[in-house]
Amino acid sequence: MKFIADFHIHSKYSRATSNQLDLKELSKWARLKGVGLIGTGDFTHPLWFEGLKRDLAPTGRGLFEYHGVHFILTTEVNTLFYRGGKAKNIHHLIFSPSLESVEKMNQELASFGDLGSDGRPLLMMEARQLVKIVLGVEPRALIIPAHAWTPHFAIFGSQSGFDTVEECYEEEAKNIFALETGLSSDPAMNWRLSRLDRYALISNSDCHSARRLGREANCFDCELDYGEIAEAIQRKDPKRFLFTIEFFPEEGKYHFDGHRKCNVVWSPAETKSHKGRCTTCGKPVTIGVMHRVDALADRPEGFRLGGAIPYRNMVPLDEIISEALGVGVASQAVEREYQRLIQEFGNEFLILFEASGEALRKQAPPKVAEGILRVREGRLKIHPGYDGEYGKIEIFGGEEAAQEKDKQLELF
């Protein structure tokens, strides 16, 4: 069976997350989005884990169910260690097929940090130690480097990362089978590094509010079974792991280099020409994902890896509606049109990827339908994100959007 999975999410117990981020809210938005399998996130947090044990119903296949939505046990942890006198903050995703193994993992990991301080705990341990402990408790677990290119907290990050998987995980690198690309990179950028060819590339929302569920995700065609899903990822099986759903990477918060306080945003070439220092304040700019990919790549931009899992870019439906109507994404007009379209088509992913142009033009305001089709064709402009600022999507020219704003609002 085909389903969309978002493995990397957070709960209300993580920092900077919605206080409504619970199983009920996640399940509601999973149905609206069309996500069939959600990571639980934060299983290391004692209060969240108690709720998971209480509220999730085991399916008997290493997954769980809540109000008709399937869940898989996942968490994100941050390991802090020192190598060559430099601090290394590396984030990892952990997948597990049973509550019993999670309970044992949590007992083992509690000696390395305060699991109750954050849904994504800080653990004072080497990356290789994490792999040994997790697989020692549960051999079927998966450990995957999270948002692999983020500057400050990732395996290849410019501020605290490494140049290879082997440098980070040492003798345990053999047990790493996949990488999470993160919002600021897509598979094509990762294909430029031949050293990454053996890894499956997964994509997830890393959502801090349920509304952002599925903004990146993975499409599978297999049974809702932990073993099958894990095997499809490990083997990069194109018959079962069909494609990933991606942000346009320019929209991610760290795509280009820059200095947010000074409104300086640069391409890698511009950064090099300025010797990496902000022309306003003189401090070093934050080196973004594109710069790091360029530095480590041994293949040209545009290289396509044969046999790789394909991907599809998307812009969230509420953002498309917002620009089409010329009003804020949090406005009532956007919410009304979003909910109306969900009622018409079933869920957001059906609208973004499956609905025919004819159906869209019949059921949606003309500008909204046109916006969806333009995104499918990649006919848009993006002002790249940098130094913690999301990029800005422009589906329609500013002047065109302004001319249509009043006309569209008449529909409501």
Image: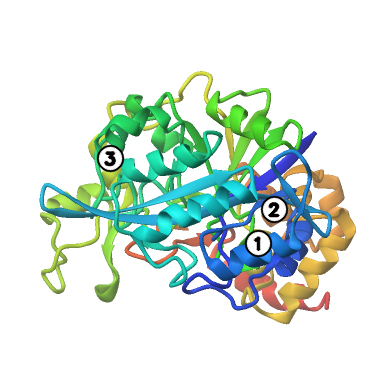
Dot 3 or dot 1, earlier in sequence = 3
Q: Secondary structure at mark 1?
A: helix
Quadrant in which residue 292 is drawn: top left
Asked if the residue under mark 1 is in contact with the one under mark 2, i.e. CB atoms within 8 Å, the reply is yes
Asked if the residue under mark 3 is in contact with the one under mark 2, i.e. CB atoms within 8 Å, the reply is no
Question: Where's the N terminus, which quadrant?
Answer: top right
- The span from disc 3 to disc 1 (Cα, nearest Å) is 39 Å
The answer to whether residue 407 is visible is no
x and y percentages locating residue 347 in the rendered image = 80, 55
Between 403 and 235, the residue placed more toward the observer is 235
Badge 2: few (under 14), some or many (20 or more) residues near its Cα, within 10 Å? many
Q: Which residue is mark 2?
A: 372
Q: Which residue is mark 3?
A: 168
Disc 2 marks which amino acid?
Answer: Ile
Tell me, for residue 190, which label it has, or none: none
Disc 1 marks which amino acid?
Answer: Ile
